[in-house]
Amino acid sequence: MPSLLGVDIGTSACKAVLVDPMGRILSSSRVRNEVYFPKPGWAEQDPERHWWAAFKEAVRACLRRAGARDIACVGISGLSTNLTPLDGRGRPLRKSILYMDTRAAAEIDRLKAELGDERFLKINGNPISHRMLAPKILWFQRHEPKLFEKTKRIVPSSHCYVVKKLTGSFASDYYVADMTGLSDVHKGEWSDELCEAVGIDPAMLPELVEAGSVVGEVAGPAAREIGIAKGTPVVAGSCDANVSALSAGVIEDGESMLSYGSVGAAHTCVSKPIIHKGLYFGHHVRPGKWVSAIAMQTVGAIVEWFRRLRGEGGRGLEELEERAGRIPPGSEGIIVLPYFMGERSPIMDPRARGIIFGLNLYHTDAHVYRAILEAFGYGLLHHLEIYAELGVRIKGWVAVDGGAKSRLWRKIVTDATGITQRYDPGNPGAPLGDAFLAGIGCGAIGSWRAIKGWVRAGEVTRPSRSAHAEYLRLYRSYRNLYELTKEEMWKLSGAGPSRSRRSSK
């Protein structure tokens, strides 16, 4: 039986799985990645080293472990949106400026001044934020004009770059386009008005297609390097979080995926547009459906940062989790604002900064660790307030990605939000969704509802009423901290608040 290959080129790792059309995993592999932080607020990766080379290594390892297999189709997802400029020969002109990079704060102010928040939201369906490609292009023009003059193509995602290397095709799905800040979300095409606002020709951007549609075939040189047969079809994937939601079976209204990745994300399936200045919105991978999305800039990334600070010689993670689990909700007086690289939703503030508040000499590393985990729960409560205003109800969450392995973290988030979570420890997340998209694209899978058969029952975590009440009480302090400190955050970021920020008070 032909196999389906799914690969996710994520921030911290490139992950590959080989599955059969029934969703059974035949083999898997994982290659760690790294991120460069050359200056405060900057984040970059090398497209050749961290995307293409990692992709090749992960795929070769996956195929080697599975033995000889016929691959029917390949699906690829990845981190987005990033600024990767290419020259006329398709070579990167610089390292990619990643979605989490906050250097373009001044350019966000410029876009807001020239277009206005309401006009931008009306066209793109999303608030202007540093996650987007649009302000990064303006920064690139201003600070690296010679490289900008040489730019012939602009790649918005890691998987778009790899697909181009693999097949020669330059294409992207609609959801990634929605997140660039350069598309008309209602028309499903690049917006002439938004592209003009950042000084580019829409022809520099990829062709837009449905996720799961075949965009090309594996070319000869790539086939020899990787070991996939020449001519194997490749489908358009999507942003890693969007495909993770598919892997969790999120294809019907009210179903929601909760991602414990480098970014904390939640994707809720809806049947009509849900547009709000504190939320993201875009095309679901399933045609005719939409996504209302939450994206907290650094959730799992803060956990990794804290583990690095403790050092390799420190206590193991299992022991740390065990001690943190004995600490009551609220971490005995510590609250963390998780804005360590600015914040996306719901505050959309690239100048926000992280805070560990309430420390005293009684506290241990386990207290700080638990408070970092609790920050995700508080951030989700902030979003749930917006959903309540909009009349959106989340039926339950399916937890995915690396951080979800922590029972403690899932319990904390469940108690904080009051929403039940389901977790399948055998679900690899985005690469499984990529494999499913590959099956849809090549006809090996005939129905979107077939993903339900790929999702296992897993573990269920239900909220504690008393813990939920305590988190709701402490949540007000979490909210107040940002409001009380944001002026100082903006000063520390190297640029004070813009006039528009002051005048809005």
Image (cartoon, helix red, strand yellow):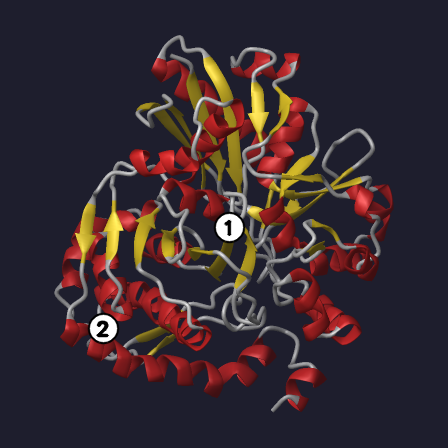
| Residue 140 picture location, percent across and down | 76, 54
Query: Which is more toward the observer, 490 or 468?
Result: 468
Secondary structure beneath disc 1? loop
In the rendered image, which residue does mark 1 sit on?
289
Which quadrant of the view contains residue 395?
Answer: bottom left
User: What's the residue at 16%, 52% (across, down)?
Assistant: 319
Q: Can residue 56 be seen here?
A: no
| Residue at the outermost top position | 68
| Quadrant in the picture for the N terminus | top left
User: What's the residue at 84%, 52% (across, down)?
Assistant: 145
In the rendered image, which residue does mark 2 sit on?
331
| Residue 147 picture location, percent across and down | 82, 46
Which quadrant of the view contains residue 131?
Answer: bottom right
Query: Which is more toward the observer, 18 or 332?
Result: 18
Q: CA distance from mark 2 to mark 1?
A: 40 Å
Secondary structure beneath disc 2? loop
| Residue at the outermost left position | 326
Q: What's the amino acid at mark 2? A: Ser
Query: Which is more toward the observer, 209 or 322?
Result: 209
